[in-house]
Amino acid sequence: MSSRTPSDRWRSHLLPALLPRGMDGWLRDPGSLTARIRARCDTFAVRVLRQRLDRVLADEAPLLGLAPGEWAWVREVLLLADGVPVVYARSVMPRATVRAGSRLFATIGSRPLGAALFANPRVVRGRLTCARLDARDARHRAAATALAPQPLPPELWGRRSVFRLRGRRLLVSEIFLPAILDLPA
């Protein structure tokens, strides 16, 4: 049994040799993932899976200044390129951020959150970290449920970062599904 904690998996530096061919650019691109996908397909869409108050994951809590298991506003979506799911995304916003007047989740609907974040010049993105996630991780399991009955590989690569607006935090995790590698580089 590994003694590593879930947060130990997330790293800012990865050896490209460990990554599937073509994955490095997706993981390290500091720009909008939405814009990158849109540039590589004819039709981009967001499928909202869930948007509700939920408990934060243990490795998300410290990034948001929350206690493990504390309640936060969670949005889970699939990003689709030409109708094919290419990314499972999970965004987590502390309830204090929502109470402070942010109507972002309430008004975003099926529009891409990334586009809204990158369109606001006052939003600052924190450092990108990356991880290889397996079925022990809740994000991998959520992606598998969303794609069922289509099976997923035992491991998926993901990235995440904290966005800040006026001192308020929002964590965005993007888990790359196998079809992402079918898009042009």
Image (spheres, rainbow, N blue to C red):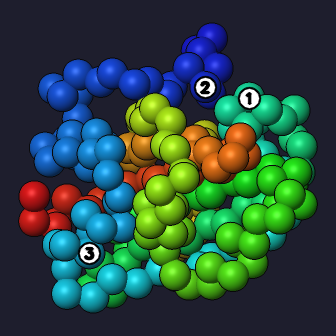
Image x and y of residue 128, in percent = 43, 36
Residue that label 2 marks: 7
Could you tell me how far apart the alpha carbons at marks 3 and 2 are, in whole angstroms?
30 Å
Is 111 rendered above or below residue 126? Answer: below
Q: Nearer the viewer, residue 108 or 5?
A: 108
Q: Nearer the viewer, residue 153 or 34?
A: 34
At horizontal 14% and vertical 48% (from top left) the residue drawn is: 22
Could you tell me how far apart the alpha carbons at marks 1 and 2 are, in whole angstroms?
9 Å
Q: Nearer the viewer, residue 163 or 55?
A: 163
State the mark number for residue 94: none
Q: Nearer the viewer, residue 165 or 184?
A: 165
Is 152 rendered above or below residue 60? Answer: below
Nearest to N terminus: mark 1 or mark 2: 2
Residue that label 3 marks: 38
Q: Secondary structure at mark 2?
A: helix
* Badge 2 amino acid: Ser
Circle 1 Cα neighbour tier, 10 Å, few/some/many (<14 / 14–19 / ≥20): few
Image x and y of residue 8, in percent = 56, 20
At horizontal 44% and vertical 24% (from top left) the residue drawn is: 11
Image x and y of residue 42, in percent = 19, 87
At horizontal 51% and vertical 69% (from top left) the residue drawn is: 116
Q: Quadrant of the C terminus?
A: bottom left
Is 67 rendered above or below residue 73? Answer: above
The reply to whether callout 1 and callout 2 are in contact (CB within 8 Å) is yes
* Badge 3 amino acid: Arg
State the mark number for residue 62: 1
Nearest to N terminus: mark 1 or mark 3: 3
Image x and y of residue 19, in percent = 23, 35
Nearest to N terminus: mark 3 or mark 2: 2
